[in-house]
């Protein structure tokens, strides 16, 4: 259980934030440590070497000015004392070497009489001050030439050798101080990182808990978390989503109630009509015929409801169900207008079609006919006597456009964003009188979407409504 919790923590945003704070808080300290120590070591070596070189140059000048070099026997004790004094001040060893690489004098006891030069000391014999640090041997060496100004030649060299600690003594102290400082900073960064990562992720925990409370029914509305801009935006999105889901759930419940009523009403009517016929003997043909016509009408009404439901279920399937063919949209609209014109005349609504150019497109003719038919039928149903429904067709190089324009009762502004939702009805009492299930526009929206098109609505109450459908001329499968 603990292992699972630890793995969950490693995958959490809190751990990621904590890790980032640790990295950006501690790593720069190590980089700074290296830079400071390297700079300090370079400066210390340069400073110490300059001081030693100046002292060796003074000693070299005294040797040449007094004519002691390379004949130094007469003042052997004085030179030895000075070399030991200089060496003792640095904890170093000093050796005098002539131009024949013979050791003339050393500040320490040695049996060697000949010095074996290396590349660096050869440069000193050529008149150059040389500084070298041997990391492996941990030795700091300086070679200073003994110069003969009169002959413009090197008489020999002075070798200064000391443990590297004489340069790095202060460096160890600096390292200890930096290390102590880094430990303090690291502890502080870890504590601050842990606290800050928890503070940054706490609003998301509250957000999750609020969503879970709504889901489990402990609260009826979503409690916003407005700690940060991101959590505020997420809260608003969640609140909008939950509100939309609630509306959808309410619409579905209402739809079930409406459909139950719509399905039950024709059945009840047919039951009443058939019982009336069965309860009477020798029913006249005229009455029998009237009853049968009423029963047939109720059957048609029941069939219409069932067909709408089946259409909606079918449109939920993959778009591969579309039967795409090259269709003349002009001819399709002509046939549709002929079929709907009797309904318009019955409602005393003028039905007009205006095509601006011939349009041929790759569509599913049956489904697209259903979609446009729903728009035109709604424009007729929700119109007023002596009103009109104007259908236009136009196209550009990529899409064709169908407008269905009416001067009917219009759609309230607050309802326009919901009319394509399934089961949504604007005016329930009015819609029930007119008929229908509230699925027509949802079916139309789905069909247009399957064709990779778009549908928009513009409406003003008591003035009319315009639906605009845009569909590509060439169908493309995703």
Image (tube, helix red, strand yellow):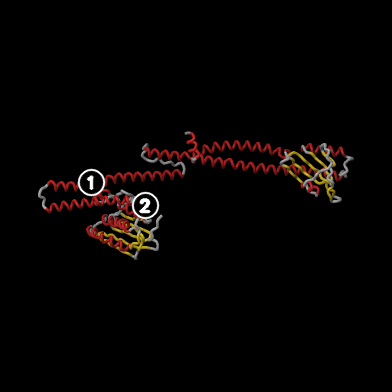
Residue at horizontal 86%, vertical 51%? 151
In the displayed structure image, the side of residue 193 where residue 352 appears, left or right: left
Q: Quick check: 140 above or below 477? A: above
Q: Residue furthest left?
A: 282
Q: Is residue 456 visible?
A: no
How many marks do you count on the picture? 2
Sequence-earlier tag: 1 or 2: 1
Instruction: Specify whether residue 286 is in view.
Output: yes
Residue assigned mark 1: 264
Secondary structure of residue under mark 2: loop
Give the percent coordinates (x, y) of residue 324.
35, 58
Write down the quadrant of residue 210 in the picture.
top left
Residue that extends furthest to the top in the rendered view of this protein: 2
CA separation in Å, label 1 and label 2: 32 Å
**For residue 318, which numbered disc appears in the image?**
2
Foreground pick, 298 / 85: 298
Which image quarter holds the C terminus? Answer: bottom left
**Relative to 351, is 14 on the left or the right?**
right
Quadrant of the image occupied by residue 350:
bottom left
Q: Could you classify mark 1 by the number of other residues whose Cα lies within 10 Å: few (under 14), some (14-19), or many (20 or more)?
A: few
Instruction: Answer left or right for 189 relative to 319.
Output: right
Find the residue positioned furthest to the right.
Answer: 74
Q: Is residue 176 above or below residue 433?
A: above
Q: Residues within 10 Å of mark 2 (few under 14, many from 20)?
A: few
Image depth: mark 1 or mark 2 in front: 2
Residue 340: give x, y in percent of width and height. 26, 59
Across and down, in percent, residue 161 comes to: 77, 40
Viewer-closest of 269 and 2: 2
Residue at position x 71%, y 39% in the image = 168
Observer-nearest of 114 and 433: 114
């Amino acid at each position: 259980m603990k292992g699972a919790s630890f793995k969950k923590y490693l995958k959490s945003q809190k751990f990621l934030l904590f890790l980032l704070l640790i990295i950006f808080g501690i790593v720069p300290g190590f980089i700074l440590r290296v830079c400071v120590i390297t700079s300090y070591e370079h400066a210390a070596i340069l400073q110490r070497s300059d001081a030693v070189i100046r002292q060796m140059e003074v000693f070299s000048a005294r040797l040449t000015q007094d004519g002691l070099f390379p004949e130094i026997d007469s003042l052997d004790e004085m030179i030895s004392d000075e070399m030991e004094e200089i060496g003792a001040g640095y904890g170093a060893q000093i050796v005098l070497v002539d131009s024949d690489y013979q050791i003339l004098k050393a500040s320490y006891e040695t049996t060697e009489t000949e010095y074996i030069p290396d590349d660096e000391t050869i440069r000193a014999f050529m008149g150059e001050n040389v500084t070298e640090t041997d990391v492996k041997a941990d030795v700091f060496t300086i070679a200073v030439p003994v110069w003969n100004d009169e002959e413009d030649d090197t008489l020999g060299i002075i070798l200064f050798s000391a443990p590297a600690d004489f340069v790095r003594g202060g460096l160890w102290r600096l390292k200890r101080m930096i290390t102590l400082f880094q430990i303090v900073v690291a502890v502080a960064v870890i504590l601050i990182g842990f606290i800050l990562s928890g503070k940054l992720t706490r609003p998301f925990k509250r957000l999750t808990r609020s969503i879970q409370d709504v889901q489990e029914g402990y609260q009826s509305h979503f409690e916003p978390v407005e700690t940060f801009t991101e959590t505020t935006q997420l809260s608003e999105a969640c609140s909008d989503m939950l509100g939309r889901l609630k509306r959808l759930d309410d619409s579905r419940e209402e739809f079930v109630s409406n459909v139950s009523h719509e399905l039950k009403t024709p059945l009840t009517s047919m039951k009443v009509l058939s019982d009336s016929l069965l309860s009477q003997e020798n029913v006249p043909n005229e009455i029998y015929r009237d009853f049968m016509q009423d029963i047939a009408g109720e059957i048609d009404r029941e069939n219409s409801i069932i067909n709408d439901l089946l259409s909606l279920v079918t449109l939920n399937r993959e778009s591969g169900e579309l039967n795409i063919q090259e269709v003349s949209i002009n001819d399709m609209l002509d046939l549709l207008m002929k079929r709907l014109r009797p309904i318009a005349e019955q409602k005393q609504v003028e039905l007009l079609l205006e095509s601006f150019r011939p349009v041929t497109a790759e569509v599913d003719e049956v489904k697209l006919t259903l979609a446009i038919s729903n728009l035109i039928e709604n424009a007729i149903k929700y119109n007023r006597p002596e009103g009109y429904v104007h259908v236009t067709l136009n196209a550009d190089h990529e899409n064709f456009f169908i407008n269905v324009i009416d001067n009917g009762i219009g759609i309230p502004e607050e309802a326009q964003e919901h009319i394509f939702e399934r089961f949504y009805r604007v005016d329930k009492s009015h819609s029930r009188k007119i008929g229908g299930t509230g699925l027509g526009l949802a079916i139309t929206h789905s069909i247009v979407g399957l064709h990779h098109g778009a549908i928009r609505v513009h409406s003003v109450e008591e003035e009319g409504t315009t639906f605009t459908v845009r569909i590509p001329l060439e169908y493309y499968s995703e």
